[in-house]
């Protein structure tokens, strides 16, 4: 009866089943997975946000498939403040980064085609691609004191069905940025095979330290057809406002934008109020972004201090909202997270949720309120012995 796109096992895993039981028992859970900024104890400019949504222009429906001119100009201003001159005409407004992916998969792939994506990384790609009848083929990120792209493995992963390469900059959860030499080689590979690069940059504003070799954004790249994705969810900590964007650049960008606008015109999914409010949101969101940056940096420093001299190790991380903790292989990752939740009331994510190819790793959200984070980490270390 139902489409093969939906052939996923929706049964709860052991961790989610135990978590539900704990919550039904009203246990006090120390949640080290919190990724929702609106529930992380941050201070929001509530009146300014509500005022921005009260624009009377929102009472009139004037659909613009690529997004309202004011909204596109506001996004161009965001990049200009970061030192990049992006014309508003190169920007297409979407309802979210997930929708941006869906549009791009529609643009380039037919059913059964392939898109390359990094491993380890956020597990959403498989679902987004599956809904477009596209297959994700993973290429590895490797760790030798820091993370890097295995470009030889990436090149070997390309087949005659490959239609695009996804990079996440910085990656989630490894927090690793693409380096300039990696981009140069990747651009060569993609140019030779006429493959576009899709660059997910939602965490790009959250770098922990400067690095002259880092690629901050591919929005200004002109070597190959490139699409840079971002939005309000991470930049301003406003996931509920549902607004993202695509910046297209490089050879063929004009033709791609024309077709993307046709796709967007079919859905017209972006709300009018949020588009009119976007300039104000980007301005007011700076204070929220600063709070988030202080939070994640403070928690990372606390984690490193707590782990020093223990049996655990914090892997190098350059940016983002997450940290990876290597824990002793005295038990499997599944046993780690189940025992932490069952005995210590600590919720953490196992590395295999992100397709780590070895064990044992825990992924911790640095967005967690500091007191909860410190208590939770203390219990993890106690269990590690």
Image (cartoon, helix red, strand yellow):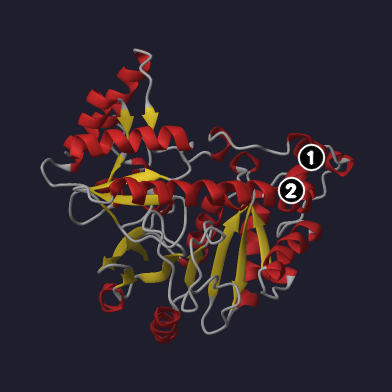
Q: Which mark is residue 379?
A: none
Residue 309 image point, x, y percent = 23, 50
**Which residue reaches farthest left?**
330
Question: Residue at 48% across / 52% down in the picture?
Answer: 297
Q: Quadrant of residue 161?
A: bottom left
235 shown above or below 182 = above
On the question of residue 21 being in view, the answer is yes
299 shown above or below 264 = above
On the question of residue 95 being in view, the answer is no
Depth check: give the residue in front, 356 or 345. 345
Q: Please, what secondary structure does the residue beneath circle 2 have?
A: helix
Question: Residue at 71% across / 61% down in the picture?
Answer: 75
Q: Which residue is mark 1?
A: 48
Local crowd size for mark 2, using a 10 Å CA cut-off: few (<14), some (14–19), many (≥20): some
Question: Residue at 40% across / 53% down in the picture?
Answer: 125
- Position of the N terminus, as image quadrant, is top left
Q: Which residue is mark 2?
A: 284
Question: Residue at 44% across / 46% down in the picture?
Answer: 299
User: In screen coordinates, is 370 left or right of 364?
Assistant: right
Q: Are marks 2 and 1 in contact (CB under 8 Å)?
A: yes
178 shown above or below 231 = below
Local crowd size for mark 1, using a 10 Å CA cut-off: few (<14), some (14–19), many (≥20): some
Between the residue at mark 2 and the residue at mark 1, the CA separation in whole angstroms equals 7 Å
Q: Quadrant of residue 26?
A: top left
Q: Please, what secondary structure does the residue beneath circle 1 have?
A: helix
Residue 362 image point, x, y percent = 28, 45
User: In screen coordinates, is 366 left or right of 38?
Assistant: left
Q: Earlier in the sequence, mark 2 or mark 1?
A: 1
Residue 200 image point, x, y percent = 50, 61
**Which residue reaches farthest right?**
56
Depth check: give the residue in front, 231 or 318. 318
Residue 109 image point, x, y percent = 44, 65
């Amino acid at each position: 009866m139902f489409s093969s796109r939906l052939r996923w096992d929706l049964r709860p895993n052991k961790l989610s089943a135990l978590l539900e039981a704990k919550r039904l028992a009203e246990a006090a859970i120390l949640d080290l997975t919190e990724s929702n900024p609106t529930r992380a104890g941050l201070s929001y400019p509530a009146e300014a946000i509500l005022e921005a949504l009260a624009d009377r222009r929102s009472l009139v429906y004037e659909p613009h498939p690529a997004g309202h001119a004011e909204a596109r100009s506001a996004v161009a201003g965001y990049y200009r403040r970061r030192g990049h001159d992006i014309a508003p005409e190169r920007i297409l407004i979407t309802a979210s980064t997930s929708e941006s992916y869906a549009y791009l998969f529609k643009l380039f792939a037919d059913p059964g085609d392939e898109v390359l994506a990094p491993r380890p990384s956020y597990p959403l790609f498989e679902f987004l691609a599956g809904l477009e009848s596209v297959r994700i083929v993973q290429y590895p990120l490797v760790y030798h004191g820091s993370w890097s792209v295995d470009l030889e493995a990436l090149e070997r992963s390309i087949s005659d069905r490959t239609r695009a390469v996804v990079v996440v900059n910085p990656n989630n959860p490894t927090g690793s940025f693409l380096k300039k030499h990696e981009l140069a080689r990747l651009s060569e590979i993609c140019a030779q095979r006429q493959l576009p690069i899709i660059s997910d940059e939602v965490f790009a504003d959250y770098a922990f330290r400067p690095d002259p070799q880092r690629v901050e954004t591919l929005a200004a790249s002109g070597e190959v057809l490139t699409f840079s994705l971002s939005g309000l969810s991470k930049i301003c900590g406003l996931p509920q406002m549902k607004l993202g964007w695509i910046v297209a650049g490089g050879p063929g960008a004009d033709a791609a934008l024309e077709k993307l606008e046709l796709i967007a015109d079919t859905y017209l999914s972006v709300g009018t109020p949020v588009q009119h409010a976007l300039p104000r949101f980007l301005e007011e969101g700076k204070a929220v972004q600063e709070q988030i940056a202080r939070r994640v940096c403070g928690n990372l420093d606390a984690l490193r201090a707590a782990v020093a001299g223990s049996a655990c190790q914090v892997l190098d991380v350059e940016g983002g909202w997450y940290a990876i903790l290597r824990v002793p292989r005295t038990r499997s990752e599944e046993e780690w997270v189940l025992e932490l939740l069952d005995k210590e009331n600590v919720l953490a994510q196992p590395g295999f949720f992100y397709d780590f190819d070895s064990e044992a790793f825990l992924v911790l959200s640095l967005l967690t309120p500091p007191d909860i984070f410190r208590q939770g980490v203390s219990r993890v270390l106690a269990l590690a012995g």
